[in-house]
Image (tube, helix red, strand yellow):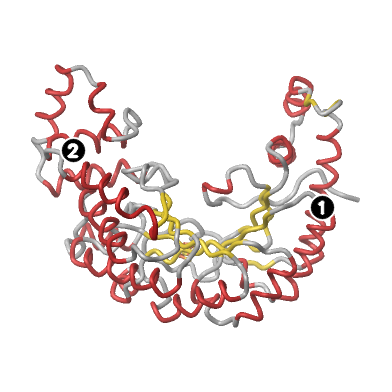
Amino acid sequence: MPGKSFRIGPIRPPSEASSLLLQVTRGCTWNRCRFCTIYRDTSFQAFSADSIKKDIDSIASIADTVRGYAKAGRWDLDALNAHLASIENDDERQSFYMVASWLLSGGENVFLQDGNTTALSSGRLSDVLVYLKQTFPQIRRITSYGRASELSRHDAAYFAELKKAGLDRIHSGFESGSDAVLSLIGKGTSQEQQIRAGKNVKAGGIELSIYFMPGIGGKALTAENAEGTAQVVNEVHPDFLRIRTAAIKPGTELFEDFRAGSYRLCSDDDKVREIRRVITLAKGAPTSIVSDHMVNLLQEVNGRLDTDSASLLEMIDRYLDMPEADRRTFQLLRRTLQAYAPGDLKNIPAGRLAALRESVMQESEESWSEQMNALIGRYI
Ligand code: SF4
């Protein structure tokens, strides 16, 4: 008997905002990154294939109910919302909302949660993928997270088997390609593992989306962070390089280092220069660089490294060439959702802009970086 709810984990990439979330593992196998607290209170658990299939059956049952509100190709949204509002149980309401949102946006993409799905054996994962696609034949893309160290244990044949079963893309938080930075942040992986993992994922026919954290190495390792990451991009040629600007949050070991004075925060400009350096060093890679998260200062850094580097660098340089008072003013407005791009400063009334320019320059660089770090941290 299918249930009225199913498990839903806490995070997914922004690019999977309209995807159905299916939890196949809970938590993270590593749980020791020195900047991350997401799963600190969650023990890792890999669910059995039967248990995951039970959730898929529940999703199918809820989907049948949701589809009952579509008549002649049109959704009766008022009735659908009334049904949603009538559900008293929180888990059931959240499950119904997720399935309804998924179907309303086409019902084509699925994201497998949580932090390290490839910790499941390929057999168990393939079994689940095949069942998922049989239950929902309209699915066009299935994606998941995978840790580089875990991915590096598997050969291309492992990934080819998953691709055949239906896995299309793996998102992996590489964060940095520099061994010095990886060690500092406790990532539990190395550049060599990243390169082996990335090459095997791609050789198996699965798209690879890796995450880069400008600023995560702090002031001391800002050059290494950019250069090591560019080396990995040049070796692996990931399909996507997604920017996740670092925010060092209270409760993490890196924040303790910062408080103790052994870790200096990068400024927003240091982080932008890291992005610039990666683009410069990896400009031949057939990789799309993507800025798709609120934590990033320059949201317009989107394009292909092999064809769009010149225009990306021009855009970055337009920002870096602005007077420092304007750069800080933009940082503040961007971090408080009052501006989207540096050009938005021209829409600020002259008197207010002059006051802002004066005010932001009262702070020392260290104090300003700390304030911006705190503002960025609100978005993760
Ligand atoms: S691997 Fe990912 S989820 Fe796990 S501790 Fe590190 S950043 Fe957090």
Q: Earlier in the sequence, mark 2 or mark 1?
A: 1
Q: Position of residue 263 (x, y in %)?
A: 21, 62
Q: Is residue 128 left or right of residue 238?
A: right
Label annotation for residue 227: none
Q: Quadrant of residue 306?
A: bottom left
Q: Residues within 10 Å of mark 1 (few under 14, many from 20)?
A: few
Label annotation for residue 328: 2
Q: Residue furthest right?
A: 1
Q: Residues within 10 Å of mark 2 (few under 14, many from 20)?
A: many
| Residue at image point 40% right, 71% down | 187
Secondary element at image label 1: loop
How many dots with numbers?
2
Q: Position of residue 45 (x, y in %)?
A: 64, 67
| Residue at image point 28% right, 28% down | 344
| Residue at image point 25% right, 47% down | 314
Q: Nearer the viewer, residue 366 or 230?
A: 230
Q: Position of residue 374 (x, y in %)?
A: 29, 44
Q: Nearer the viewer, residue 290 or 364?
A: 290
Residue mark closest to the camera, 2 vs 1: 1
What amino acid is labelled 1 in the image? Answer: Pro
Q: Nearer the viewer, residue 157 or 251?
A: 157
| Residue at image point 55% right, 70% down | 29
Q: Is residue 137 above or below residue 81?
A: below
Q: Position of residue 99 (x, y in %)?
A: 73, 41
Q: CA distance from mark 2 to mark 1?
A: 50 Å
Q: Is residue 365 left or right of residue 33?
A: left
Secondary element at image label 2: helix
What amino acid is labelled 2 in the image? Answer: Arg
Label annotation for residue 137: 1
